[in-house]
Amino acid sequence: MPDQLVYAMEVTLNGLMTGVLYSLVALGFVLIFKASGVFNYAQGVLALFAALTLVGIQNGQVPFAHMINAMTGGHLTDFGWHIPAVIAILLTGVVMVLLAIVIEKLVLKHLVNQAPIILFMATIGMAYFLEGFGDVMWGADIKTLDVGLPQGINETIEIATERWFGYGFFIDNLDIVATLIAILLVTALTVFSQYSKQGRALRAVADDHQAALSVGISLRFIWILVWSIAGFVALVAGIIWGTKSGVQFSLSLIALKALPVLMLGGFTSIPGAIVGGLIIGVGEKLFEFSIGPMIGGATENWFAYVLALVFLVFRPQGLFGEKIIERV
Amino acid sequence: MKDMNEGYITPDGRQIGGVLMELKNITLKFGGVTAIENISFDIRDGEIRAIIGPNGAGKSSMLNVISGFYIPTEGEVWFKGYKRGPMKPYEIARLGIARTFQNIALFDGMSVLDNIMTGRLTKMKKGLLAQAGWWWTGAAREEYENRDKVERIIDFLEIQNIRKTPVGRLPYGLKKRVELARALAAEPKILLLDEPMAGMNVEEKEDMCRFILDLNDEFGTTIVLIEHDMGVVMDISDRVVVMDYGKKIGDGAPDEVRNNQAVIDAYLGVAHD
């Protein structure tokens, strides 16, 4: 087998794994957009906040330590305990649900019946607030996150590919785990939204608020539910990205990578978020591999956006998005 | 004057019960505009009560007051003998008051079956965690039982063949019927129908009339409906409230209302000879 083809296969595999991570972030957007028609600009920051909280809880950090120290002149840093990863993740989940309740109470409740653009602006505000709040609460330094996910090269694959192609593929264990988690998460969310009564209520609210009220659905409960789920997805994305590249501000920028994924897959489709993520993941890696060297490289920075732009021109509703046809 | 608690017997021999809902001196204002002015009437158990009136008379506003979408500026709503406090529309839906809308409000992205299943939400008690347990916690059984009830309504309204169709693709007349099915799925005490026959052809109207009469007969559902087609209203309703410019100008059996001079003037047009 020619070397180039083998390399391309490795690149494709790696692209698929990266794509899964993009999908994971995009999923959070799709969930909220489907249920409330709001594009949640704060999704990336939500992931950052979740990761910060997780690290903080795990290491027994005192929240608002800097603020407390500045006011009292003390030297608090941590409680001196270390909480097992599973419990820390559960506690962070609780924090994300509380956050959803607070967001509903302080922001969404007051914006019922407002145009989507108003809600969008509100999420921009929330993004900046949460970003600062996370810093104040847990400190602005870069943290490492370790919840026991395996990392490093997967040797089984390396040895197997070495034997087949005479060249060992470099596949990160973390990417494999991330893929499995993403598959689980997507399956769970799909089953939830298609078959459970709350899922049905959620889809109902997305379609028509008035009608939803008339069958006895509390909008308040659904919004809290949706934001909790978005928070949960953000937590999963935060764990994986945080493990990969450390918990730091740039984590919130992965949300930008989700944008082209959404344009490709469609804002309203869960499968769309998955397929869109995979296409972009593979596309940008292969493009960099094949065309990159000819035009000076660094194509990964812009490839996704250009692809999204092309889609906007030819298929604005995305691959799986609902085409809205107005009957006249 | 009929006795408040005794009820009455209709010309076609149906027994109508006592007062189920009473609206006392309802006034509804939007800023300077008075949509409803000091209107009182009652709705009795098992009757078909119509609200008629020219465009802009405040009929839909009245229905919105009953279903809680509007909170009246003044006046009281009594339901089952208790005064109803200010409640959210979804809380009122849970009390057993279901409705349809003038401009059809269905969940377009969902199938007919799913749409009607949302009508059962108030009847399904299993929480979020119980749902995750599915077979283990009995959530599956609950789903099947409710599905059963929905299938019966689907049979009743003769929409078996479109069960799996996304609602957005259905023609207008069928959408109206699905909306009725969804309201019916909640097994309401009072069913509010906002112009159930608007925009339908003669055949569809006849079907809808038949369904309304049948469901009143079979399930004993009390029905409050707004309708423009005078023939239909006079045919199917037991008592009629007539509104004009937010005021009540007539109330009684169809024949009484038909002969009421104020009603003839306001609604059917002043007679010139």
Image (tube, coloured by chain):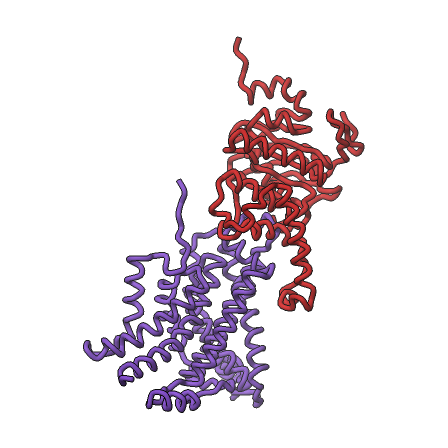
Chain colours: A purple, B red
Residue at 54%, 16% in the rendered image: B270
Residue at 66%, 37% in the rendered image: B223
Q: Position of residue A296 (x, y in %)?
A: 20, 78
Q: Quadrant of residue A192?
A: bottom right
Q: Nearer the viewer, residue A43 or B58?
A: A43
Q: Quadrant of residue B188?
A: top right
**In the drawing, does residue B215 fall left or right of residue A94?**
right
Q: Position of residue A195 (x, y in %)?
A: 58, 61
Location of residue B43 with respect to A229 vertically, above or below: above
Q: Position of residue A150 (x, y in %)?
A: 48, 87
Q: Quadrant of the C terminus of chain A?
A: top left
Location of residue B72 with respect to A17 vertically, above or below: above
**In the drawing, does residue B31 fall left or right of residue B253?**
left
Q: Nearer the viewer, residue B238 or A169?
A: A169
Q: Nearer the viewer, residue A283 or A91?
A: A283
Location of residue A305 with respect to A6 vertically, above or below: above
Q: Position of residue B205 (x, y in %)?
A: 56, 31
